[in-house]
Amino acid sequence: METFDGGIVRVTLPMPSRPGHVHSYLLPGADGWTIVDTGLGLPDAKERWAAVLAALDGPVARIFITHFHPDHVGAAADLAGLTGAPVYQGALDYEQCERTWRSPGRQELTSAWLRANGMPSAEEEEMRAFGAQYQQMTRYQPDPLLVEPGDRIDGWELVPAPGHADGQLMLLKDGLLVAGDHVLPRISPAIGLWPDSSPDPLGDYLAALADLPSLEARVAFPGHGDPIADPAGRAAELIAHHGERLDTLVGFLGDEPQTPYELSFVLFGPDLSPAGRRFAVTETASHLERLLRENRAEREDADGVIAYRRATVS
Ligand SMILES: [Zn+2]
């Protein structure tokens, strides 16, 4: 545990896949601690949290979930059980959380969607094991207290941060921003198109990044990596990064339609694990949908397969 500005305590939890760790943040308040995010539901999550709680000087008043990804929501039920504290989660985010992790047909939906984006069946099969592994590590808390952007929790304003997850919420108070995975140092958060995500997650993300300076945050505490001393500057870097990626991708488009799967090889290279390829395809797809909306690409849906080509100049 490490203590930062405003008495914020950071707890770092392990992750078996990249980036190898995830942070939870404990925010001090008059009625006790607010724990932001919970780490993966690893087999020893409860023991780990019990040790953290034993070292705290006060009760846990509430648990807040920034977004439904396994490394953030995964141990929510464990932690709620240990503390008896209520769990708060954004209404849109919880809807996606339930749809993603509870529905037994979800894997089929994702599989069909990846095949429609050009992924070969054999490779898609390999990814099921990865998906099943994460399903097991996602013990979200059913029926949390639902919150909306603009609501306040113990004096912290909830700020919408779509892109990485449609319903992601950050917490803002006195220039301190607990940012989930909206802005990360060094790495660019994955902005993926998924079968039932927003149709233009990259557009949502770039708009939210453009709004970030208006928050006047002097430091951001990210889900992965060190605190960001210039959140507005980091947002500008991420906007520039995606601008370059969009330009690169449009350069790979030709007159013959190519699938997001095919284009993911030129954009992300050939050497990826099945899980890495899955993220590459969803991220390539989000960039293609952005190009489509900028009239820089055209989409073709033939025989249930989605493919893109360069926009014809009119
Ligand atoms: Zn994360």
Image: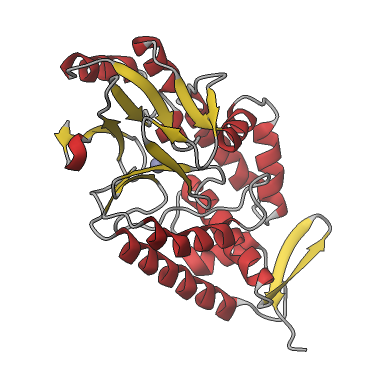
Residue at 37% x, 37% y is 156
Q: Nearer the viewer, residue 185 or 26?
A: 26
Residue 75 lies, with reference to residue 253, above or below; the image says above
Q: Quadrant of the N terminus?
A: top left
Residue at 49% x, 23% y is 140
Residue 206 seen: yes
Residue 303 pos. (x, y %)? 84, 57
| Image quadrant in which you'd find residue 128 | top right
Q: Nearer the viewer, residue 251 or 202?
A: 202
Q: Nearer the viewer, residue 114 or 106?
A: 106
Residue at 46% x, 75% y is 244
Residue 277 pos. (x, y %)? 51, 52
Residue 15 pos. (x, y %)? 33, 35
Q: In the image, 313: left or right of 171?
A: right
Determine the quadrant in which ligand 1 lies: top left
Residue at 65% x, 64% y is 289
State the residue lying farthest toward the bottom: 314
Residue 270 seen: no
State the residue lying farthest toward the right: 303
Q: In the image, 281: left or right of 212?
A: right
Residue 37 lies, with reference to residue 181, above or below; the image says above
